Image: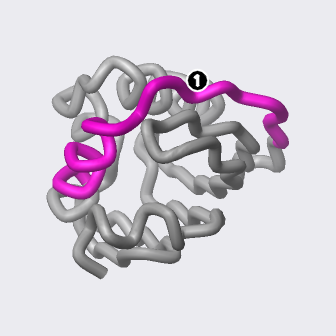
């Protein structure tokens, strides 16, 4: 499966709260960095996504950029605490996501993660 389809499946699973599917799309050596947390394995990210899922109402993609095995998705994350524009950079190999960088204004969300 090409990386664009993997990322689409990841976002659809996030919207649906399907964390088993997300786990299956992530490489064991995941390198995740965002404004609130950093993880070097899928389980830490899954835990944070489960918390985030409690407030997510929708994820509306605006633009996707593809450059080889790098994908950048810009989207609006609609949550119970408001709308947040997000840019997410993914890299993958062998059909798995092994690198994610997330960029957004974390101030409204930090209290939810005790940060």
Q: Position of residue 63 (x, y in %)?
A: 83, 34
Q: Is residue 1 visible?
A: no
Q: Position of residue 114 (x, y in %)?
A: 23, 75
Query: Which residue is painted at 71% across and 49% down in the image?
Result: 85
Name the one closer to the observer, 87 or 54: 54
The region drawn magenta spans 46-65
Query: Which residue is painted at 64% across and 54% down in the image?
Result: 88
Query: Which residue is painted at 50% across and 71% down in the image?
Result: 34
Under tag 1, what secondary structure?
A: helix
Q: Is residue 106 above or below residue 67?
A: below
Q: Position of residue 57 (x, y in %)?
A: 45, 25
Name the one closer to the observer, 69 or 48: 48
Q: Is residue 96 above or below residue 61?
A: below
Q: Is residue 36 above or below residue 19?
A: below
Q: Is residue 60 visible?
A: yes
Q: In the figure, is residue 30 to the left or right of 9?
A: left
Query: Which residue is painted at 25% across and 57% down in the image?
Result: 48
According to the picture, the residue beneath numbered tag 1 turns out to be 5
Q: In the figure, is residue 8 to the left or right of 54?
A: right
Please say whether residue 89 is one of the residues in the magenta stretch: no
């Amino acid at each position: 499966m090409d990386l664009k389809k993997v990322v689409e499946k990841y976002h659809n699973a996030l919207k649906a709260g399907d964390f088993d599917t997300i786990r299956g799309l992530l490489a064991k050596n995941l390198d995740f960095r965002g404004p609130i947390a950093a993880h070097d394995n899928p389980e830490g990210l899954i835990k944070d996504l489960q918390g985030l899922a409690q407030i997510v109402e929708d994820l509306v993609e605006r633009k996707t950029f593809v450059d080889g095995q790098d994908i950048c998705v810009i989207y609006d994350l609609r949550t119970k605490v408001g709308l947040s524009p997000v840019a997410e950079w993914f890299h993958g190999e062998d059909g798995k996501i092994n690198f994610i960088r997330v960029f957004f204004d974390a101030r409204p969300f930090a209290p939810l993660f005790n940060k």
